[in-house]
Amino acid sequence: MKNATQLRISGEMRRGICGCAGSGGCASRTAAAAIPTPFLLILIFWLAVVFASYSLFVEPSWTVIAALLVFALSISSALFLVADLSQPFVGVMQLPKEQLRHTLGPLG
């Protein structure tokens, strides 16, 4: 047996999730504030300085170049995942909208 507060909260959740999943409204609302541009620029600059300092103080060899390329690939992949997952309904890795609709059934 549900009381009035539980029914109200359940209805709000259902409207919010269905509205986001159905129209893509959440994706457009969160796209502007996904990752602040100044933060991203400072992070990229900081990582470039770190990689530059590593490469300045090491004698160049194939091992060092390969290690720097692997590190750069891992950092760029992590940044890509953070940027992609900050918008859950668009991009390479998306949340399925139908799964959200099926999840609401037991909540109601």
Image (cartoon, rainbow, N blue to C red):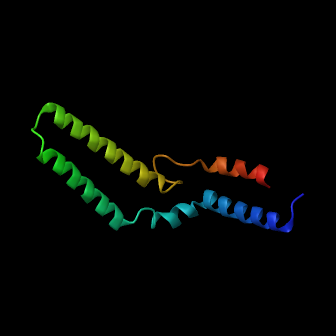
Front one among 85 and 54: 54
List x then y, in percent, for residue 102: 71, 48
Q: Is residue 10 left or right of residue 52?
A: right
Q: In this view, which residue lies farthest toward the top?
A: 63
The relative height of residue 2 versus residue 51 in the rendered view (above or below) is below
Q: Residue 2, relative to residue 65: is it above or below?
A: below
The quarter of the picture where the C terminus appears is bottom right
Question: Residue most toward the left?
Answer: 59
Using the image as rendered, state which of residue 49 and residue 35 is in the foreground. Answer: 49
Q: Is residue 64 above or below residue 87?
A: above
Residue 65, image x, y percentages: 17, 37
The tally of labels here is 0
Q: Residue at the spot x=28%, y=57% of the render?
A: 44
Q: Residue at x 90, y 57 (%)?
A: 1
Residue that protrudes farthest toward the right in the picture: 1
Task: Report the residue at 45% width, 67% height from top.
Answer: 32
Percent of width and height locating residue 25: 57, 64
The residue lying at 37 percent from left, 51 percent from top is 79
The image shows residue 60 at horizontal and vertical percentages of 10, 37
Asked whether, in this view, residue 105 is left or right of residue 97, the answer is: right
Give the image quarter of residue 41.
bottom left
Residue 104 in the figure: left or right of residue 91: right
